[in-house]
């Protein structure tokens, strides 16, 4: 446990006491559980790979009293407004990115407060935007007005509120925000994708046919851009395998990532698609896809000089995207 953050949960009646960096934050457990409105599972929201939660705890270990007080306010106000834990996560990521979760009295141009709101842009008066309670409520007001915000990746939702010139920076604090929601907010599974979620998704009835097709193509050469019948690239093989089962997939791997229900990759079932990216946390960098066939094995068209083949997969191998996709579901 890092010296910067000592977290201990002391049960006393219905109260939880969080001791952190000399500050004592008291959270009402009964109220939290009553207002922790869950949302449907989306494995693309929040870290699911081994090690990501460890990183979140490490990042949280660097927070001090004012920052933890801000997190506590974000969570408690979110609960009072009956907002889902995903909203708390979005606000934490935005606040950490904009101000380090501090109510600053300075910023770029006239930006102020936790979320660096600009009075000149209609966010409120300087006194209002530097008041943490006002700022958090204002952030939630704008968030709730964004159509489909709960289906966005939290960093993207934060960007939709903040409209920053550097939209990708909000993703950096995703593991830490999940960790804080799950510990300080007492939410066992912030993404809604806990153990067994993969088996809770409806089965893909066409998976067997897709697997049979892909296995029959073993030995055929890899050719970039090829979609069969004599050669394939990675996504071309997936396209034809599922086409044989009556399911039409997009042509390229990055689009195939959006072609079904998502689940944590370590819960993949036979017929699910698994992906690799240059940055495993950023689906925009996906460059490879394969078909999981069960028992820790995939079938794939991998690269030039290597024919279609099967191989073992490790859930923590480099570049593996944390989400699998179940086509047709």
Image (cartoon, rainbow, N blue to C red):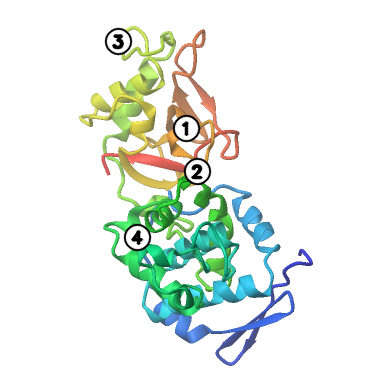
Q: CA distance from mark 1 to mark 3?
A: 27 Å
Quarter-of-image position of residue 10: bottom right
Tag 2 secondary structure: loop
Q: Earlier in the sequence, mark 1 or mark 2?
A: 1
* Residue of label 4: 40
Nearer the observer, 172 or 100? 100
Quarter-of-image position of residue 220: top left
Residue 328 position in % (x across, y down)? 26, 39
* Residue name at image x 46 percent, y 53 percent: 155
Q: CA distance from mark 4 to mark 1?
A: 26 Å
Q: CA distance from mark 3 to mark 2?
A: 31 Å
Residue 217 position in % (x across, y down)? 37, 15
19 versus 264 height, above or below: below
- Of labels 3 and 4, the one closer to you: 4
Residue 30 position in % (x across, y down)? 48, 86
Can you name the residue that lies furthest to the left here? 246
| CA neighbours of label 2 inside 10 A, class few (<14), some (14 to 19), many (20+) | many
81 versus 14 height, above or below: above
* Residue of label 2: 322
Say whether marks 4 and 1 touch (CB < 8 Å).
Answer: no
* Residue of label 3: 229
Nearer the observer, 253 or 21? 21
Residue 75 appears in the figure: no
Q: Earlier in the sequence, mark 1 or mark 3?
A: 3
Q: Earlier in the sequence, mark 4 or mark 2?
A: 4
Residue 266 position in % (x across, y down)? 51, 44
* Residue of label 1: 285
48 versus 141 height, above or below: above
| CA neighbours of label 4 inside 10 A, class few (<14), some (14 to 19), many (20+) | few
Q: Earlier in the sequence, mark 3 or mark 4?
A: 4
Residue 69 appears in the figure: yes
Quarter-of-image position of residue 215: top left
């Amino acid at each position: 446990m890092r010296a910067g953050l000592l977290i201990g949960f002391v049960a006393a009646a219905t109260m939880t006491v969080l001791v952190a960096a000399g500050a004592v934050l008291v959270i009402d457990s009964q109220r939290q559980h009553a207002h922790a409105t869950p949302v449907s599972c989306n494995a693309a929201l929040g870290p699911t790979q081994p090690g990501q939660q460890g990183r979140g705890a490490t990042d949280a270990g660097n927070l001090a009293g004012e920052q933890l007080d801000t997190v506590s306010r974000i969570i408690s106000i979110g609960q009072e407004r009956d907002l889902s834990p995903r909203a708390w996560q979005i606000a934490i990521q935005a606040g950490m990115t904009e101000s380090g979760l501090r109510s600053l009295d300075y910023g770029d141009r006239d930006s102020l407060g936790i979320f660096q709101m600009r009075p000149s842009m209609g966010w409120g008066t300087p006194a209002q935007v530097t008041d943490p309670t006002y700022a958090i409520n204002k952030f939630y007001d704008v968030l709730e007005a964004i159509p489909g915000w709960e289906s966005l990746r939290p960093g993207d939702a934060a960007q939709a509120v903040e409209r920053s010139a550097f939209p990708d920076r909000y993703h950096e604090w995703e593991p830490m925000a999940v960790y804080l929601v799950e510990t300080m907010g007492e939410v066992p599974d912030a993404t809604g994708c806990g153990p067994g979620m993969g088996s809770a998704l409806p089965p893909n009835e066409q998976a067997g046919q897709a697997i049979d097709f892909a296995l029959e193509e073993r030995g055929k050469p890899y050719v970039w851009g090829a979609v069969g019948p004599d050669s394939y690239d990675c996504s071309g093989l997936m396209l034809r395998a599922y086409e044989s089962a009556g399911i039409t997939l997009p042509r390229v791997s990055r689009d195939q990532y959006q072609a079904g229900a998502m689940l944590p990759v370590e819960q993949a079932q036979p017929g699910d698609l698994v992906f690799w990216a240059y940055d495993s946390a950023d689906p925009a960098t996906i460059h490879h896809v394969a078909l999981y066939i069960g028992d820790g094995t995939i079938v794939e068209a991998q690269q030039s000089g290597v024919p279609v083949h099967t191989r073992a997969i490790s859930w923590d191998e480099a570049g593996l995207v944390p989400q699998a996709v179940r086509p047709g579901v």
